[in-house]
């Protein structure tokens, strides 16, 4: 989509004029990193820090340029009467978009944190693929039980990464980096995309989700939360998987129809293991049966965590792009219709 300054009421900022940049975030160290970026770039910017627990309403009313956590700012959107641009500290902005549903399109520009999660997500995914293939999960259980498995068990079943089949649901910028990391280890990758795409080295693409997940050793879900993806992963869909498939969900919890489908899919042997970093309800309730299921690995939404240095760098890159009137250089511009 094409963007212009006039579309969002943005004006080019004269470098002589001191501008206020408001910060509403719990990202540790972000205030210090933003101040460092402002100093190094010699920008005429005054950083105004708002209390995440109870931000000053008057300050929100006057904020034109804002760096914020979606989970905090979503409930204060009505107070942002002067806003021109918001930089999200998260990759996902569905929390904000849900608050905007049924309302006129905002006059301000929203950009999400993008371009930095690829390496972090790749490390998480590859780590769990290797852990599953080398039976690290089972070894941990055996150690806890003080059990030394038989020689036959120890020498059977292990397979190297070469020719391991992996599906990447959501082969966008992050998904492409994850795919490349898998290909580097000799894996064969199928990427799910919205629009047809020519094959890459070691990667083929499809627009059919059932085709993508069929005959795979691993399925990695990186789908964002959008109107087209919410509830996409159902028990019926998982019937297209192999009984040994390890399903890794590091995208968004609500692309799964219900957290209950995992235990059903595992108990019915539709899949062999589930590595879950995101859920419909977070934190995952203490009484969830997922905690104790032997074929479920749970991590608390940490597959790729926003790093203060990266957020500050991207935020100030985008701020400078706006200040210079270069809208095409803004990274992570959110298209409301797409949801990302």
Image (cartoon, rainbow, N blue to C red):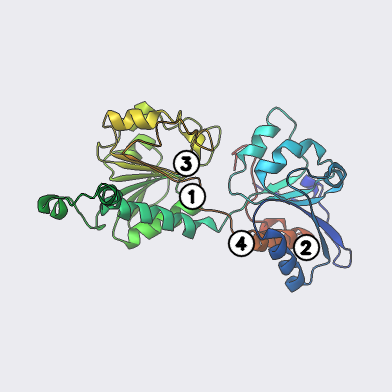
Q: Residues within 10 Å of mark 3 (few under 14, many from 20)?
A: few
Residue at the location (39% across, 59% down)? 180
> Label 3 belongs to which residue?
194
Q: CA distance from mark 2 to mark 4?
A: 21 Å
- Dot 1 or dot 2, earlier in sequence: 1
> Depth check: 277 or 53 in front?
53
Q: CA distance from mark 4 to mark 1?
A: 20 Å
- Dot 2 or dot 4, earlier in sequence: 4
Q: Residues within 10 Å of mark 4 (few under 14, many from 20)?
A: some
Foreground tag (4 vs 1): 4
Q: Residues within 10 Å of mark 2 (few under 14, many from 20)?
A: some
- Dot 3 or dot 1, earlier in sequence: 1
> Label 4 belongs to which residue?
310
> Label 1 belongs to which residue?
172
Disc number placed over residue 23 in the picture, else none: none
> Depth check: 43 or 266 in front?
266
């Amino acid at each position: 989509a094409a963007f212009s300054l006039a579309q969002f009421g943005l004006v080019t900022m004269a470098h002589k004029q001191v501008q206020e940049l408001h910060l509403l975030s719990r990202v540790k160290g972000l205030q210090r990193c933003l101040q460092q970026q402002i100093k190094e770039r010699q920008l005429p910017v005054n950083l105004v820090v708002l209390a995440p627990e109870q931000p000053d309403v008057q300050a929100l009313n006057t904020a034109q340029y804002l760096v914020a956590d979606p989970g905090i700012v979503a409930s204060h959107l009505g107070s942002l009467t002067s806003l021109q641009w918001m930089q999200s500290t998260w990759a996902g902005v569905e929390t904000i978009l849900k608050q905007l549903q049924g309302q006129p399109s905002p006059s301000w520009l929203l950009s999400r944190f993008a371009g930095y999660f690829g390496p972090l997500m790749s490390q998480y995914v590859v780590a769990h693929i290797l852990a599953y293939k080398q039976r690290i999960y089972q070894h941990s259980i055996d150690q806890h039980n003080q059990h030394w498995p038989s020689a036959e068990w120890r020498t059977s079943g292990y397979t190297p990464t070469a020719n391991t089949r992996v599906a990447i649901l959501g082969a966008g910028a992050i998904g492409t980096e994850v795919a490349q990391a898998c290909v580097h280890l000799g894996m064969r990758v199928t990427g799910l995309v919205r629009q047809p795409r020519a094959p890459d080295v070691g990667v083929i693409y499809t627009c059919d989700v059932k085709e993508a997940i069929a005959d795979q050793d691993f399925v990695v879900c990186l789908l964002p939360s959008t109107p087209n993806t919410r509830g996409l992963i159902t028990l019926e869909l998982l019937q297209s998987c192999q009984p040994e498939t390890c399903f890794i969900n590091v995208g968004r919890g609500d692309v799964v129809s219900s957290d209950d489908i995992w235990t059903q899919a595992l108990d019915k042997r539709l899949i062999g293991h589930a590595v879950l970093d995101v859920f419909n309800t977070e934190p995952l309730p203490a009484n969830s049966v997922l905690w104790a299921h032997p074929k479920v690995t749970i991590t608390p939404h940490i597959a790729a965590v926003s790093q203060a240095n990266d957020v500050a760098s991207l935020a100030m890159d985008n701020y400078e792009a706006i200040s210079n009137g270069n809208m095409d250089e803004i990274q992570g511009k959110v298209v409301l219709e797409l949801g990302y």
